[in-house]
Image (cartoon, helix red, strand yellow):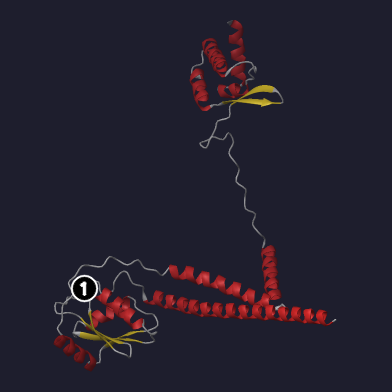
């Protein structure tokens, strides 16, 4: 007992008050099982507490024991215990280190850009027409994908339509409203931006003093005026009276019309956003036409090459037959 106490005092004085360090450095014989290891360590800590009068060593050991795992290693036919490796949440003993991303220098970036420019120039000035066409086609398809991604940002989720009873108009009323709308000079333009919040706002401002309003769509693709009429009727809750051949729509506000508090619907684009969307749509349309043109050009070139090879083979066969 005296020997254990003196041994504990020397260990405790050398390792200060942190006894867990000594537990981690303790070498256990390989023939002891895990239960025997814990019992032996616990008995030694109890004896040291009694001999030195220091309290809290067993408590510290219990904390260490709860957070410590014992691993059995069998390397080169030798059984060894590894004490003190606490597994992480994923179950692995050691945490993998993250590799740091090496930043490229300014000179390296310029060299890389120069390499890609030279590579593109080589393809553009290639003597083979197929290489030139394929390079242009690949570049145009990349631009088309980029434009589609840009246009997805301008998609506004439509709010659920409010339930309302549309007014039923007789043929006489429709004829009267049609003549009235044609005679009046008040109109709302729908230009290249298409239907956005400002168009609906202008319609409500016109309906403040007039029953009807003309919506002039210019420029307008064939058949697009009907899509505009349907969209404006949904947003403004107006009634379409007539659609003219010159892309003019006549709207009627209704008998029980009440001007809404928010005249510009929230599920519409602003003026600047609508213009930006129009530019992307125009670019996408031209890019799609250019891709179709390049595909047709590549198809014609491959057909001519196949025809030339076939004619060459036929000429060789004829020459062999003659000889």
**Residue at image x 16%, y 90%?**
176
Is the residue marked by circle 1 packed among few (<14), some (14-19), or many (20+) residues within 10 Å? few
- Say whether residue 270 is left or right of residue 185: right
Depth check: 182 or 290 in front?
290
The location of residue 65, given as percent across then percent down, is 52, 23
Identify which residue is drawn at 63% across, 18% down.
28
- Which of the pair 230/119 is nearer the observer? 230
Q: Is residue 127 visible?
A: no
| Residue at 26% in and 77% down | 233
**Count of numbered labels shown in the rendering:** 1
Task: Report helix, strand or loop for mark 1.
Answer: loop
| Rendered residue at 77%/82% (across/down) | 315
Q: Nearer the viewer, residue 282 or 108?
A: 282
The image quadrant where one finds the N terminus is: top right
Which is nearer the eye, 164 or 45? 164
| Quadrant of the rendered image containing residue 193 | bottom left
Q: Is residue 244 left or right of residue 46?
A: left
Task: State whether residue 13 appears in this view.
Answer: yes
**Image coords of residue 323 (percent x, y):** 85, 81
Name the spot of residue 168 as percent of width and height, x first: 15, 78
User: Residue at label 1?
Assistant: 260
Work out whether 183 lies above or below 16. Answer: below
Could you tell me residue 102's position as x and y percent?
Answer: 65, 54
């Amino acid at each position: 007992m005296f020997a254990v106490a003196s041994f504990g005092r020397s260990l405790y004085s050398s390792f200060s008050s942190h006894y867990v360090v000594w537990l981690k450095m303790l070498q256990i014989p390989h023939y002891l099982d895990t239960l025997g290891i814990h019992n032996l360590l616990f008995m030694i800590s109890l004896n040291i507490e009694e001999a030195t009068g220091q309290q809290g060593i067993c408590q510290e050991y219990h904390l260490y024991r709860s957070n410590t795992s014992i691993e059995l290693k069998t390397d080169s036919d030798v059984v060894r215990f590894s004490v003190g490796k606490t597994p992480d949440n994923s179950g692995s003993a050691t945490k993998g280190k993250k590799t740091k991303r090496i930043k490229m220098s300014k000179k390296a970036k310029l060299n890389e850009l120069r390499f890609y420019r030279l590579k593109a120039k080589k393809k553009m000035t290639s003597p083979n027409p197929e290489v030139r066409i394929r390079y242009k086609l690949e570049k145009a398809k990349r631009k088309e994908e980029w434009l589609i991604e840009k246009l997805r940002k301008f998609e506004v989720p439509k709010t659920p339509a409010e339930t309302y009873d549309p007014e039923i108009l007789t043929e006489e009323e429709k004829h009267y409203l049609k003549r009235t709308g044609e005679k009046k000079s008040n109109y709302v333009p729908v230009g290249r931006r298409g239907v956005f919040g400002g168009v609906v706002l202008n319609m409500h401002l016109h309906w403040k003093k007039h029953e009807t309003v003309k919506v002039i769509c210019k420029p307008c693709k064939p058949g697009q005026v009907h899509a505009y009429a349907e969209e404006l009727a949904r947003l403004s809750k107006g009634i379409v009276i007539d659609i003219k051949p010159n892309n003019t729509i006549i709207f009627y506000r209704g008998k029980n019309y009440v001007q809404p508090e928010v005249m510009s619907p929230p599920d519409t684009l602003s003026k600047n956003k609508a213009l930006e969307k129009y530019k992307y749509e125009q670019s996408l349309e031209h890019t799609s036409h250019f891709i179709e043109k390049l595909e047709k050009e590549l198809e014609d070139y491959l057909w001519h090459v196949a025809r030339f090879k076939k004619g060459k083979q036929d000429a060789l066969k004829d020459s062999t037959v003659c000889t």
